[in-house]
Image (spheres, grey):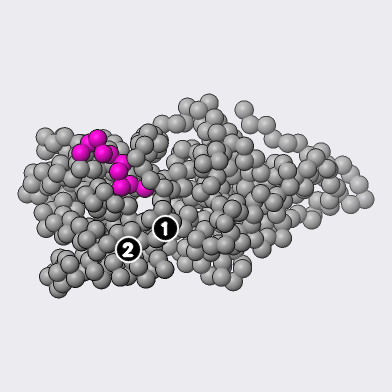
């Protein structure tokens, strides 16, 4: 049951209410008309926007002294706008941020508000284990708090595979075998957008070579030989009809079963596979593709699905912290959000979902798959570098269309990666 604070309004010369604007137990009397306005920004689809707005309304009922102005959009527009706002110091007081932004905008840890500097009682971090909180630290400063963990995951339309009499693929060889069976109907056993395919093939190269792409101190560990492994696998997968070229990837083909599988984030499970399930197909999160089933997870990476942070320029840190705590730990937000962003890391929020029997569905199953796979490595922001991914696809196409040899393209990609990491 959700309990809301009651604010009794007394008739005075000027109407007043009692409110706790600070995070301490001190009660502050403020005129009713003088609300503190703070801003909240996030990205996502219509479903995410709807439940976040509902949550904000619940927060404002609990804290009538605070008004929250909401800014939101789909990812591409949000990213572009946020980039400008971060540069011009006009970002929202509380904002949803991508994991890589900590490195892009706060390399020294001073790009976002230091959450450890908030007064006691504003933000409850006791529900978050330290090994998760460290994802939000830059230079020892707590810049953000992860909402849930995320990993690129293999989703398989089991109904399509069963139609062809095939087992759920677990290895790379399984995929090539499935392609031999499916290609007569122009069906692909696997698919993915550019970033997903880059990370997918990265896993293969790490499995084959036994080397990680980055050193312990985030230097480039791959040589041109490891990049050559990735390029050649991409070309083979295209030519043998295992995956479509990333330029021609269309998510709607998952709805009809033209793509019998895809690589997508845990947090995007329903966005990618929801329509196929609505059509009556059975979709499951499969093992992380590997050379052998026992190697599942090797070469694959996990990271925070997304984080909440506060603006270093906020003029209202305590009010912003109250909203941040509400988004992370409250029963209202937990129930409205469910597992749409993955299984909440906050033990408090997760407990509310358990009470409501809401820990179910494809996204929950994908989260469990991620949590139970011990071989996953910690994602470094460099692996999501947009320039690197674009150059990787360009090098793949040079080999695919016989413009360059795999050795030449691998050397080129190596030099690009080296320049980007320095």
Q: Is residue 287 above or below residue 406?
A: above
Quarter of image, res 55: top right
Mark 2 Cα-neighbour bin, 10 Å: few <14, some 14–19, many ≥20: many
Residue 167 image label: none
Report the magenta residues as a range: 292-301
Left or right, 90 with reference to 135: right
Query: Magenta-highlighted stretch: main secondary structure?
Result: loop
For disc 1, the neighbor class at 10 Å (few under 14, some 14 to 19, many from 20) is: few
Secondary structure of residue under mark 2: helix
Which residue matches tag 2?
389
Please say if 148 is above or below 382: above
Look at 36% across and 37% down and name the residue there. Answer: 374
Rendering coords of residue 15 (x, y %): 86, 49
Residue 294: within the magenta?
yes
Question: Residue at horizontal 52%, vertical 33%?
Answer: 350
Residue 422 included in the magenta stretch of the image: no
Quadrant for residue 411, please give it.
Answer: bottom left
> Percent position (x, y) of residue 310?
62, 55
Work out whether mark 2 precedes mark 1 in sequence or the reverse, and give the earlier one: 1
Along the line of sight, which residue is nearer the eye, 35 or 135?
Answer: 135
Whether residue 362 is visible here, answered yes or no, is: no
Residue contact between numbered discs 2 and 1, judged by CB atoms under 8 Å: no
The residue at which mark 1 appears reads as: 218
């Amino acid at each position: 049951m959700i309990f809301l604070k009651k604010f009794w309004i007394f008739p005075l010369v000027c109407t007043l209410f009692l409110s706790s604007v600070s995070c301490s137990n001190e009660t502050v009397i403020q005129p009713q008309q003088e609300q503190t306005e703070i801003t909240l920004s996030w990205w996502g689809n219509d479903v995410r926007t709807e439940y976040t707005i509902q949550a904000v309304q619940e927060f404002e009922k609990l804290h009538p002294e605070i008004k929250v102005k909401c800014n939101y959009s789909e990812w591409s527009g949000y990213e572009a706008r946020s980039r400008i706002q971060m540069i011009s110091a006009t970002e929202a007081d509380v904002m949803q941020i991508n994991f890589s932004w900590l490195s892009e905008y706060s390399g020294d840890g001073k790009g976002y508000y230091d959450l450890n500097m908030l007064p006691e009682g504003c933000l409850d971090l006791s529900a978050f284990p330290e090994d998760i909180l460290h994802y939000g630290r830059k230079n020892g400063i707590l810049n953000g708090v992860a909402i849930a963990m995320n990993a690129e995951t293999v989703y398989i339309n089991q109904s399509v595979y069963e139609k062809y009499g095939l087992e759920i693929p677990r290895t790379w060889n399984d995929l090539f075998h499935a392609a031999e069976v499916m290609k007569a109907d122009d069906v692909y056993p696997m698919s993915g957008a550019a970033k997903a395919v880059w990370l997918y093939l990265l896993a293969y190269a790490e499995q084959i070579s036994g080397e990680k792409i980055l050193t312990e101190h985030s230097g480039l560990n791959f040589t041109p030989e490891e990049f050559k492994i990735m390029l050649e696998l991409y070309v083979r997968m295209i030519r043998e009809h295992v995956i479509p070229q990333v330029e021609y990837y269309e998510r709607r083909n998952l709805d009809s079963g033209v793509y019998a599988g895809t690589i997508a984030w845990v947090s995007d499970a329903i966005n990618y596979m929801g329509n196929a399930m609505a059509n009556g197909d059975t979709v499951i999160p499969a093992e992380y593709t590997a050379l052998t089933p026992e190697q599942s997870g090797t070469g694959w990476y996990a990271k925070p699905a997304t984080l909440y942070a506060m603006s270093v320029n906020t003029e209202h840190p305590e009010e912003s912290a109250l909203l941040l705590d509400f988004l992370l730990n409250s029963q209202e937000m937990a129930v409205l959000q469910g597992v749409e962003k993955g299984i909440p890391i906050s033990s408090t929020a997760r407990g509310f979902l358990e009470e409501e029997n809401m820990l179910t569905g494809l996204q929950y199953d994908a989260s469990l798959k991620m949590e139970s796979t011990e071989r996953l490595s910690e994602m470094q922001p460099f692996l999501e570098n947009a320039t690197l991914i674009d150059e990787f696809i360009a090098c793949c196409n040079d080999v695919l269309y016989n413009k360059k040899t795999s050795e030449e393209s691998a050397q080129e990609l190596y030099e690009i990666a080296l320049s980007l990491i320095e």
